[in-house]
């Protein structure tokens, strides 16, 4: 094999490994049957939430997975696959699952979230979680509930007297 080709492939493997490391959420899915317009639409929707879609050769992704110790991901690397890289835990997965509801060609295979490999069911579960702002809102409402109950009790006592 040409030394130039080997160098190019090593660079791609390093790039994929780097993207795995830098992303909080990675989803591996099959896109067979999607048109160019549908892929463009999916890429646009993902960019809006800070996620990115990339397509690499399975052999190069397999090597990157080996490099990072994600051996369980290798069993899912068959057929035409795409990788979704997201800096948010569930924003990319949420967009992909929503897109998959209307396009049955999208087949979610696996994901890596915070260096843990999950199956298709796990990806869908993570996609159903509230986003960062939703979690903060839920937390603040939990903190606010006792204060509201105390205020309501004091007001009821004051009105009674």
Image (cartoon, rainbow, N blue to C red):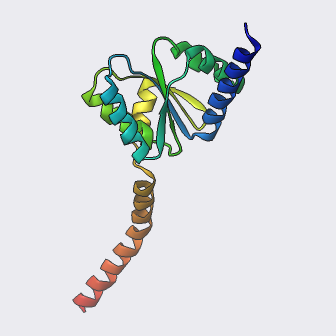
Residue 88: percent from left, percent from top: 50, 46
* Residue at image point 33% right, 84% down: 154
In front of the other: 35 or 147: 35
Which residue of the protein is positioned furthest toward the bottom in this rendering?
161
Q: Quadrant of the N terminus?
A: top right
Residue in the picture at 55% in, 13% down: 75
> Residue at position x 59%, y 38% from top?
114
Would residue 128 be visible to someone looking at this image?
Answer: no
Q: Is residue 114 left or right of residue 83?
A: right
Q: Position of residue 52 (x, y in %)?
A: 48, 38
Which residue is the extreme one toward the left? 160
Q: Is residue 140 visible?
A: yes
Query: Above or below — where is 156 with respect to 118?
Result: below
Q: Left or right of 116: which side holds 81? A: left
- Where on the picture, by quarter, is residue 150? bottom left
Foreground of the two, 137 or 108: 108
For the image, the number of numbered tags is 0
The C terminus: image quadrant: bottom left
Residue 90, given in percent of the width and then of the height, sits at: 45, 42
**Residue furthest toward the top?**
1
């Amino acid at each position: 094999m040409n030394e130039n080709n080997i160098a190019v492939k090593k660079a791609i493997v390093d790039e994929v490994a780097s993207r795995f490391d830098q992303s909080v959420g990675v989803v591996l899915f099959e896109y067979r049957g999607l048109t160019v317009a549908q892929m463009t639409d999916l890429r646009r929707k993902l960019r809006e939430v800070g996620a990115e879609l990339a397509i690499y050769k399975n052999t190069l992704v397999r090597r990157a997975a080996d490099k990072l110790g994600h051996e369980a991901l290798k069993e899912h690397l068959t057929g035409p696959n795409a990788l979704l890289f997201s800096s948010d835990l569930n924003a990319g997965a949420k967009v992909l699952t929503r897109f998959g509801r209307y396009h049955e060609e999208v087949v979610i295979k696996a994901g890596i979230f915070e260096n843990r490999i999950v199956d298709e069911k796990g990806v869908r579960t993570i996609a159903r979680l509230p986003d960062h702002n939703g979690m903060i809102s839920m937390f603040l409402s939990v903190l606010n509930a006792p204060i509201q109950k105390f205020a309501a009790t004091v007001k009821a006592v004051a009105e009674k007297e």
